[in-house]
């Protein structure tokens, strides 16, 4: 048995990128560049497309990099994933300090490598990577070490003149017009999450960070209705990388939106990724002007907000509640007067009006000193998802 008191860190520095498999690459290009103001900065080479049987485009805003790949014919990884699932996150990519050490530690702890370390060179330096299987359904974890390597990855090369998003600057490495900064956390849904929590602890070396369980309805008063969940957040303290994990909670397991996600996704997997911003009010106002749709928040949430913030010990906040109500932004906090603001885009299937786009969505978050996950907002989010599912 692994001695958790002496478990060495893997040397993760950050979430480098998400690898997202999609049916329609042109649709994804329009979404990221025109709606989210990401810049398209790289594309797959002809050689990579021929060998991998998929076409890819890399979109970036700040430190948020999302590689979208669509199948070309049959046989490639994107085709195999999409044969089973709707659009979804097929790989989460971590940057590490020392690839050989990371590989050795994972193998010693019972991790399951898919391949040996693959090494590549260009005129700038070296690139090394390997992947492992995970309990996150068909989502793999990929680890990489770049040392002066110029391209994003082998076979994914910069385009001659990067396509800027609306209002973004071509090739900008500082971010985009909406101010996206980095991946704050990744949230995944499971029919049972305990194996994942143990795997994150004993293989990845993560620690328990936060947990909650609740039911969205008073089951005594509304017999047969409601969405229950248990959630546990695991994190890697050195890097600050956080993974939130959800499972359905009785008594209405099958009706739980967590279970509905698993059924719609056709297996466990990544539900959403949170993108951090420096000014959420400006970002959401701009996104709404671009036609981006968000999960709705009931008016009662804002009617009760001043009392709830006082009860939490947050006190006064910088943003007018009328503005938050107008934009649908949620607020939560802690007793040390710190707080966070967050909002959730509609699921991709609803955004595109296509079930094949899947139940994945993005969260936008701004932290004002609060490192937590907002228990009150957690409930508001799940009630909002429940209303969306009832509409569908």
Image: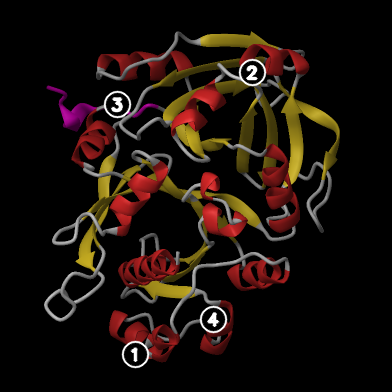
- Whether residues under marks 3 and 1 lie with C-beta atoms below 8 angstroms apart, the answer is no
Gap between marks 4 and 3 measured at Cα: 43 Å
Outermost residue toward the right in this view: 161
Disc 3 versus disc 1: nearer the observer: 1
Position of the N terminus by quadrant: top left
Q: Position of residue 252 (x, y in %)?
A: 18, 61
The reply to whether residue 175 is visible in this rendering is no
Instruction: Look at discs 2 and 3 and give the one toward the viewer.
Output: 2
Q: CA distance from mark 2 to mark 3?
A: 38 Å
The structure residue drawn at horizontal position 39% and vertical position 73%, both measured from the top left corner, is: 332
Out of 280 and 385, give the one closest to the viewer. 385
Q: Tag on residue 53? A: 2
Occupied quadrant, residue 122: top right
Give the distance between the C-alpha atoms of the residues marked 4 and 2, in whole angstroms: 45 Å
Image location (x, y in percent) of residue 271: 42, 49
Is the residue marked by circle 2 packed among few (<14), some (14-19), or many (20+) residues within 10 Å? many
What is the C-alpha distance between the residues marked 1 and 4? 15 Å
- Count the labels in the image: 4
Q: In the drawing, does residue 220 fall left or right of residue 209?
A: left
Q: Earlier in the sequence, mark 1 or mark 4?
A: 1
- Identify the residue position indicated by label 1 in the image: 307
Q: Quadrant of residue 305?
A: bottom left
| Secondary structure category for the residue under label 3 | loop
């Amino acid at each position: 048995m692994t001695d958790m008191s002496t478990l060495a860190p893997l040397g993760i520095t950050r979430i480098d990128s998400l690898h997202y498999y999609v049916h329609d690459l042109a649709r994804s290009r329009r979404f990221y560049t025109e709606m989210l103001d990401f810049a398209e900065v790289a594309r797959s080479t002809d050689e990579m497309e021929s060998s991998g049987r998929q076409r890819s485009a890399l979109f970036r805003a700040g430190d948020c990099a999302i590689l979208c790949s669509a199948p070309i014919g049959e046989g490639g990884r994107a085709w195999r994933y999409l044969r089973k699932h709707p659009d979804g996150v097929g790989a989460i990519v971590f940057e590490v300090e020392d690839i050989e050490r990371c590989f050795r530690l994972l193998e010693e702890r019972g991790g399951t490598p898919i391949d040996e370390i693959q090494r590549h060179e260009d005129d700038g330096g070296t690139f090394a990577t390997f992947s492992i299987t995970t309990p996150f359904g068909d989502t793999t974890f990929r680890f990489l070490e770049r040392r002066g390597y110029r391209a994003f990855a082998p076979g994914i090369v910069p385009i001659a003149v990067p396509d800027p998003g609306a209002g973004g600057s071509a090739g900008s490495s500082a971010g985009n017009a909406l101010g996206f900064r980095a991946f704050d956390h990744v949230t995944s849904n499971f029919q049972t999450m305990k194996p994942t929590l143990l795997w994150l602890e004993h293989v990845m070396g993560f620690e328990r960070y936060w947990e909650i369980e609740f039911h969205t309805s008073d089951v005594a008063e509304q017999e047969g209705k409601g969405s229950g969940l248990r959630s546990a957040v695991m994190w890697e303290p050195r890097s600050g990388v956080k993974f939130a994990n959800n499972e359905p909670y009785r008594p209405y397991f099958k009706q739980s939106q967590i279970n509905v996600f698993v059924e719609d996704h056709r297996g466990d997997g990544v539900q959403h990724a949170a993108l951090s911003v420096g000014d959420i009010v400006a970002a959401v106002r701009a996104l709404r002007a671009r036609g981006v749709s968000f999960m709705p928040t009931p008016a009662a949430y804002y009617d009760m907000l001043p009392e709830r913030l006082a009860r939490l010990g947050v006190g006064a906040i910088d943003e007018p509640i009328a503005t938050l109500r107008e934009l649908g932004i949620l607020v939560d906090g802690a007793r040390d007067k710190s707080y966070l603001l967050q909002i959730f885009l509609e699921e991709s299937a609803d955004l595109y009006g296509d079930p094949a786009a899947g139940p994945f969505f993005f969260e936008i978050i701004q932290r004002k000193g609060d490192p937590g996950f907002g228990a009150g907002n957690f409930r508001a989010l799940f009630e909002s998802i429940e209303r969306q599912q009832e509409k569908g």
